[in-house]
Every structure is written in C-alpha cells, then in structure tokens.
Image (tube, rainbow, N blue to C red):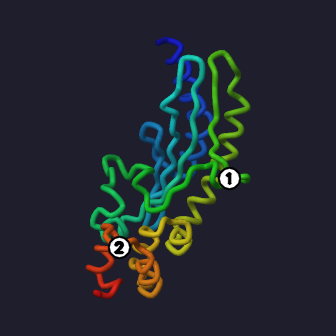
Amino acid sequence: MAARSVSAVAVADIISRAVQPLLKQQGFKKAGATFRRAAGDCIQVLNVQSSRWNSPEAATFTINVGVFFPAVHSLADGLLGPPSLRGGPAEYNCTVRKRIGSLIPPTTDLWWTVRPGESTDRVVEEVRAAVRDVALPWLDRASNPTNARNEAQPVAAMLLSVVQGDLETARALAAKLKVGTAAYAWAREHELIASP
C-alpha cells in the first residue's frame, strides 16, 4: 500500500509543480485534480487523469481539456449528459473536449509515467510545456463558440449552432443524425428536422 501511495504522491507532486502554479496564475481554481475558470460565456476545464491501472511500481496520467457552455447544456435537455455541477462542470461534461495527446503531433494518446525513486524533473517540464503551449491556447480557441463548434461532436455542434442563432448549420447537422436517437427526436421537436 505504501508503494502505491509513493506513486500517487509523485503524480500529486507533478501537478503541484507543473500544473497548479501555471493555472493559478491564469485564474483557474483547483478542485482535486481538476482546474476551472470562467471565460466569458463558458467555463474552461483542465483535468489530470490518473490511469485506473496505476500500481505500486508506476503511476501513469494524462491531461484532458474541455469547454463547458452553460447555454448549450440548458438547451440540450440532457442530450449531452447531466452536468456534474458540484464545484463546477467535470471535463467529461464539457460541450467540447479533447485529450492532450490529440492536440500534439503526431496526435497519439499521450500518457506520462512516473516511478518511485525516479526523478520527475523531465516529466514536470514536459507537462508544464504541454499545459502552457498546447492546453491553454486550445482552451482559449475553443471558448469561441464558432471554434468550439468546429471541434465538437455532431450533437454538441448542432446545439452550439442553435445557441449562436445559426439555424442553417444546425439544420444541416441535424439532417445527419441517426433516426431513432434522442438527438434526432430533440432536433425534430425543435423543428430542425421536418416531420415526415
């Protein structure tokens, strides 16, 4: 049990050295391994996700980023899942979200590994650079609803279009929805898809 704690402590140390100071300086508030800040009409979210397969020998983690648009979720009637609003939205509830590896060429799933007794200095520098040079710029770009729509999954993109008043784009996206899904029913109910 103590070795597992050593791995968990190593990840917590990396968060406190690489992520927390940088995000605090940018106005983010920390809750656990999640950081949030209000940015206009949205909330930016960065989460440090530990692997469920962590062991006493090694701890692996990645970074997830997302932007939560309250207006989209209010309109969505649960299509995007219930937001976890205790303390703010969780990354997985965000309107648009990405894993850090998908934003860094060659766009592979990127996880860092730390082991008890090994120096974490290299990982601290890599994580700090990824947050500063990739995550923060992406969060700022995706906080613009048009940019977010271009990054979002189809249902979220349709909802963002409705919120923006771009019903032509919303209808085009709705036309691609699978018949019989909750999103299709929502689009019909909101007259984005004509009744047969």
For the residue carrying disc 2, how many other residues have a C-alpha within 10 Å: few (<14), some (14-19), or many (20+)? few
Q: Residue at x 52, y 33 (%)?
A: 51
As drawn, the label of residue 179 is 2
Q: Residue 189: where, in percent of width, then height?
A: 26, 79
Q: CA distance from mark 1 to mark 2?
A: 32 Å
Q: Residue 17: where, in percent of width, then height?
A: 61, 33
Q: Nearer the viewer, residue 117 or 22?
A: 117
> Which amino acid type corresponds to the residue marked 1 in the rendered image?
Thr
Residue 174 vertical position relative to residue 31 in the rendered view, above or below: below
Quadrant of the snapshot with the C terminus: bottom left
Q: Which residue is mark 1?
A: 107
Q: Residue at x 42, y 80 (%)?
A: 175
Quarter of the image where one finds residue 63: top right
For the residue carrying disc 1, how many other residues have a C-alpha within 10 Å: few (<14), some (14-19), or many (20+)? few
Q: Residue at x 45, y 76 (%)?
A: 176
Quarter of the image where one finds residue 69: bottom left
CB-based contact (under 8 Å), mark 1 and mark 2:
no
Left or right? Give the position of 2 relative to 180. Answer: right
Q: Which of marks 2 and 1 precedes in the sequence?
A: 1
> Which amino acid type corresponds to the residue marked 2 in the rendered image?
Val
Residue 97 vertical position relative to residue 40 in the rendered view, above or below: above
Secondary structure, mark 1, is: loop
Left or right? Give the position of 170 relative to 128. Answer: left
Secondary structure, mark 2, is: loop
As drawn, the label of residue 79 is none
Q: Residue at x 37, y 69 (%)?
A: 72
Q: Nearer the viewer, mark 1 or mark 2?
A: 2
Q: Residue 99: where, in percent of width, then height?
A: 57, 50
